[in-house]
Image (spheres, rainbow, N blue to C red):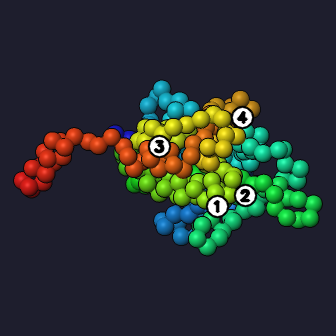
């Protein structure tokens, strides 16, 4: 059955996907960072691959709040999420001279995307928050849909792709636990800016204790989540909207992941028996 590529790709270069899209006409310029799109595909060599978001399903009743999934972290730049971090997550006295450092790295720690800090008059660093900005990777490929969009053609069938929820759970959350532990010892917090659907997938796998009291000393990891909604200022387009701000501790998150309820022993024995028959 023919497949409309617009039922897979939601946005290209910050605009709702349309047939005969030509991102090269604008120099592959991302409107949210005001520079060339940094995404690449092995199919395109050095040419940018400006796919911003995908549809989780192609049903006619899809809702962007539920079904539009961001696959590029730069997509969040449509809103001032850094200011939102200060307004919603800053647990200290209001910063007098807030500054933002990018890609802060340290041996034995790793790196964080951003650090919002209050710089003192003598140039020293006072209170600070670290911020990690995360989108989700995909499995399979939507490249055939991207090429079909540019050519203005339908595909013979739906491209095979999905969202790598497990990678977020295994890799990103593990990193947050480790960095949350460091921030606990520093008396501060790390903020995870992610899409609400991604956050919910983590909760579904490990229902850890959460609190809306972000200023609590027991909170050292804060999730600030967004969904995408119809943009009233740009009919037919979408925009990020804050969904929730919740905090937890590295210990709570780690315990929920490591000490989940054990599956049935008898069920596992059944799997052993099945494996022996192969």
* Residue that sits furthest to the right in the current view: 121
* Among the 4 quarters of the image, the one containing residue 94: top right
Q: Badge 4: few (under 14), some or many (20 or more) residues near its Cα, within 10 Å?
A: few
**Which residue is nearer to you in this view: 50 or 100?**
100
C-alpha gap between disc 3 and disc 4: 32 Å
State the residue at coordinates (52%, 41%). 199
Instruction: Please report whichever mark, 1 or 4, sits nearer to the chain's N-terminal start.
Output: 1
Q: Are marks 2 and 3 in contact (CB under 8 Å)?
A: no
The residue pinned by badge 1 equals 112
Q: Earlier in the sequence, mark 2 or mark 4?
A: 2
Quarter the N terminus occupies: top left
- Looking at the image, residue 232 lies above or below residue 275: above
* Rendered location of residue 177, percent (x, y): 53, 54
Q: Secondary structure at mark 3?
A: helix
Separation of marks 1 and 2 at Cα, in angstroms: 7 Å
CA–CA distance between discs 1 and 4? 33 Å
CA–CA distance in space, label 2 to label 3:
24 Å
Pointer 2: what residue? Answer: 115
How many dots with numbers?
4
Residue 202, which numbered label? 3
């Amino acid at each position: 059955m023919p497949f409309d590529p617009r039922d897979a790709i939601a946005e290209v270069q910050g605009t709702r996907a349309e047939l005969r899209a030509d991102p090269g006409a604008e120099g592959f310029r991302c409107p949210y960072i005001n520079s060339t799109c940094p995404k690449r595909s092995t199919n395109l060599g050095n040419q940018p691959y400006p796919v911003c978001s995908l549809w989780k399903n192609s049903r006619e009743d899809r809702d962007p709040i539920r079904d539009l999934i961001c696959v590029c972290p730069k997509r969040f730049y449509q809103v001032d999420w850094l200011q939102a971090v200060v307004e919603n997550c800053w647990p200290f006295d209001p910063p007098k001279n807030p500054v933002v450092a990018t890609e802060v790295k340290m041996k034995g720690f790793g790196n964080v995307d951003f650090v919002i800090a209050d710089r003192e008059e003598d140039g020293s660093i006072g209170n600070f928050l670290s911020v990690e900005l995360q989108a989700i990777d995909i499995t399979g490929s939507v490249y055939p849909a991207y090429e079909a969009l540019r050519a203005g053609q339908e595909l013979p069938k739906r491209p095979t792709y999905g969202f790598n929820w497990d990678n977020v759970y295994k890799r990103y959350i593990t990193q947050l636990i480790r960095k949350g532990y460091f921030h606990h010892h520093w008396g501060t917090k790390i903020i995870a800016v992610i899409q609400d659907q991604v956050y919910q997938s983590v909760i579904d796998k490990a229902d850890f204790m959460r609190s809306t009291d972000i200023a609590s000393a027991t909170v050292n990891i804060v999730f600030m989540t967004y969904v995408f909604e119809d943009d009233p200022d740009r009919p037919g387009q979408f925009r990020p909207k804050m969904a929730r701000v919740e905090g937890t501790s590295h210990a709570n998150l780690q315990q929920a992941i490591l000490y989940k309820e054990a599956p049935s022993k008898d069920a596992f024995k059944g799997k052993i028996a099945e494996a022996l028959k192969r």
